[in-house]
Every structure is written in structure tokens, then in C-alpha cells.
């Protein structure tokens, strides 16, 4: 008698079902605890003047969260990311950012 284990596709499907069940259980638990606050994320195209702390910017295809924004000479902005990397944005360049919480908050720029 040969004991056949499920093939990789069956194991993957079973694992997916298990993870989905856990996710549903977690969502139900969160709703029951009142933790159903939804985060609104939006994708915006902004220039250097519109960058805010907390925005997520893709540089070279890698997302970086802005930790600090400082104004430099010539209206350029120095963006410091959470990982310590720095990027200088020219005032005429528009970039796409992802912003959580609906935006509309005050822009925190240090001179």
C-alpha cells in the first residue's frame, strides 16, 4: 500500500483556504472589537510644494515613506525617508505619491 501525499498544487490550495479562513476570522474579531476604522489611501500627483511627511514615494520602483521634508535654496525639497535615504526634488518635477488618511492635513516643512 502506497501512502500518497497531496501534490504541490493541492497543498497550495489547502494553504490558501486556511489563510483565507484565518483572515475572515481576524476580520470578524476586529469588527467585534470596534477596530473597523478604515484607512483611506489615495494616489496623488504633486510637485515639491505638495509633499508631506508620511507620503509614500516610489524612487527607482522602490516605495519609500517620507519621514522629513526640508526646503532648500531654489524651492527644492530635501526628502528624507524612514530608511535614512535622502532625495532632492526639484520644484518643477511632479511625482505620484500614495497618501493615507485622506490627506488635507497641514504640510510640515522645515526650513
Image (cartoon, rainbow, N blue to C red):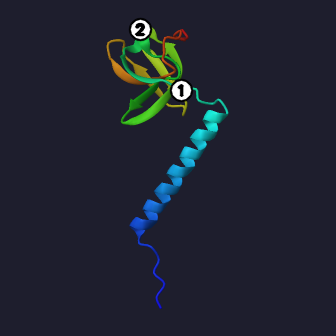
Q: Which residue lies furthest to the bottom in this view?
A: 1
Mark 2 packing: few (<14 Cα in 10 Å), some, or many (20+)?
Answer: some
Where is residue 66? Give x, y as percent: 50, 24
Which residue is under mark 1?
Answer: 38
Q: Where is residue 108 in the image (x, y as percent from the top left)?
A: 55, 11
Identity of the residue drawn at 50% across and 28% down = 65
Q: Position of residue 7 (x, y in %)?
A: 41, 72
Q: Of label 2 and label 1, which has the lower sequence position?
A: 1
Q: In this view, does 108 lie above or below 63?
A: above
State the residue in front, 99 or 75: 99
Image quadrant where residue 92 sits: top left
Helix, strand or loop under label 1: loop
Q: Residue at image x 37%, y 14%?
A: 47
Q: Is the residue 108 above or below the residue 88 in the image?
A: above
**Front: mark 2 or 1:** 1
Q: Where is residue 69 shown, x and y percent of the image?
A: 51, 17
Q: Which of these two is toward me, 102 or 29? A: 29
Looking at the rendering, which quadrant does residue 24 occupy? Answer: top right
- Circle number at residue 105: none
Position of the C terminus, as image quadrant, is: top right
The image shows residue 31, relative to residue 6, as above or below, that is above
Question: Which residue is disc 2 drawn over?
Answer: 75
Amino acid at each position: 500500500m502506497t501512502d500518497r501525499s497531496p501534490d504541490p498544487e493541492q497543498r497550495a490550495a489547502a494553504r490558501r483556504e486556511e489563510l483565507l479562513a484565518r483572515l475572515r476570522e481576524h476580520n470578524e474579531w476586529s469588527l467585534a472589537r470596534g477596530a473597523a476604522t478604515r484607512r483611506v489611501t489615495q494616489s496623488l500627483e504633486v510637485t515639491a510644494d505638495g509633499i508631506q511627511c508620511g507620503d509614500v514615494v516610489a524612487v527607482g520602483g522602490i516605495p519609500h515613506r517620507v519621514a522629513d521634508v526640508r526646503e532648500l535654496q531654489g524651492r527644492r525639497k530635501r526628502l528624507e525617508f524612514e530608511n535614512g535615504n535622502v532625495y532632492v526634488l526639484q520644484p518643477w518635477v511632479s511625482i505620484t505619491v500614495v497618501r493615507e488618511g485622506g490627506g488635507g492635513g497641514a504640510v510640515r516643512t522645515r526650513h
